[in-house]
Image (spheres, rainbow, N blue to C red):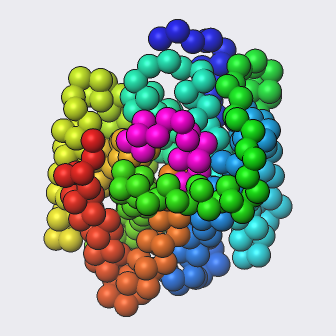
Amino acid sequence: MKSNKLAVISVMLCFFTMGFVDLVGIASNYVKEDLMLSDSIANIFPSLVFFWFLLFSVPTGMLMNKIGRKNTVLLSQVVTVVSLILPLFGENFPLMLIAFSLLGIGNTLMQTSLNPLVTQVIQGNLASTLTFGQFVKAIASFLAPYLAMWGALEVIPSCGYGWRVLFAIYFVVCVLAALLLYATPINEEKAEASEHTLGQQFAACFKLLAKPVVVLSFLGIICHVGIDVGTNTTAPKLLMERLGMTLNEAAFATSLYFIFRTIGCLTGSFFLRVLKTRTFFVISVICMALSMAGMFIGTDKAVLYAAIALVGYGNSNIFSMCFANALQALPEKKNEISGLMIMGLFGGTLFPIAMGVASDAIGQIGAVAVMTIGVLYCVFFSFKIK
């Protein structure tokens, strides 16, 4: 690959900060325990984070046309820095709602702008490159539960933050990532000036959903994120319900999920170069289907851990394949397609709400049933993906 090494390092560090959004899974479990909330109320936190993808994804695609992709990523880093510093001042319900909202807004800006920025920095197989970025992102994701446990168990009692120490650590990393990107020169292709009004641009963007390749990929991302956030929040609860673990013991389930998602991203960046996308998509869906079966019937640690590992590996590359499938179908509409695809992360709002209601009604098996709906769509999409 012909690319500027400093730019590659800078962009990949931004992918690492993109992974901070996944701390919402373990964080919502700790907030639930500390504030004594029900599943339905606690699941508001991950739902709120991903709600902003619905509102800001498409406008961010238009913002990129005005200020450029790099500047949009820098703006996202500023918003993320603010979201990470707020929980250090306390843990009351309103403050955490504001922090998680800002985390979602910052991540919306970042995910919409960073993925197309990659095409300016790295020349190569797009699905493979995005998958490697997801691998870097997943490192931050699986570290979050360990950092939370580290603080909760008072390994560093002098700081006084408890499990919230993970916000302090990620705050420092996010500041460093923003400074490095700011100092890195990146040559961007300039977007063509539009003669249309803002309303006409919105309408033209959403008209792209009329194209089957776009709408099918969009729905695939909704299901991917729903399964991702769902497993992130439900896996510890499943172990607590079935095996009687404490939250600190069960928090390992979230890390296990992200460990295998990380392995999946790393190996996926290779497999997507040597296998057809559809072939690897089918393999991924089979892993997720086996996982759902294990979560439905599993009553011992080995089966449940295997199920969590399988969904981590299977779900690791779904986003990259769906995103690349749409982006390569309409390369002249990169910013608009990116906005639409990232809007699909709104699935992280829909699934946790439904899962919270289902789990309050019939236990965590209800949450697993909701995730299974997403897996069934991926089975359908495996016959359609190019």
| Closer to the camera in the image, 164 or 56 | 56
The answer to whether 234 appears left or right of 189 in the picture is left
- Residue 156 in percent (x, y) is at 68, 46
Main SS of the magenta part reads: helix
Where does the image place residue 197, in percent across and percent down from the top left? Answer: 76, 57
In the rendered image, the quadrant that contains the C terminus is top left
Q: Is residue 272 visible?
A: yes
103 vs 25, nearest the viewer: 103
The image quadrant of residue 4 is top right
Q: Does the stretch in magenta take in 327?
A: yes
Residue found 28% across the figure and 75% down from its top: 369
226 vs 113, left or right, is left
User: Is 355 drawn above or below residue 206 in the view shown?
Assistant: below
Asked if residue 139 is positioned above or below residue 206 in the image, the reply reads above
Q: Which residue occupies 61% across, 42% down?
A: 335
Q: Is residue 310 visible?
A: no
82 vs 69, left or right, is right
Q: Residue furthest bottom?
A: 361
Q: Is residue 18 above or below residue 86?
A: above
Q: Is residue 351 left or right of residue 87?
A: left
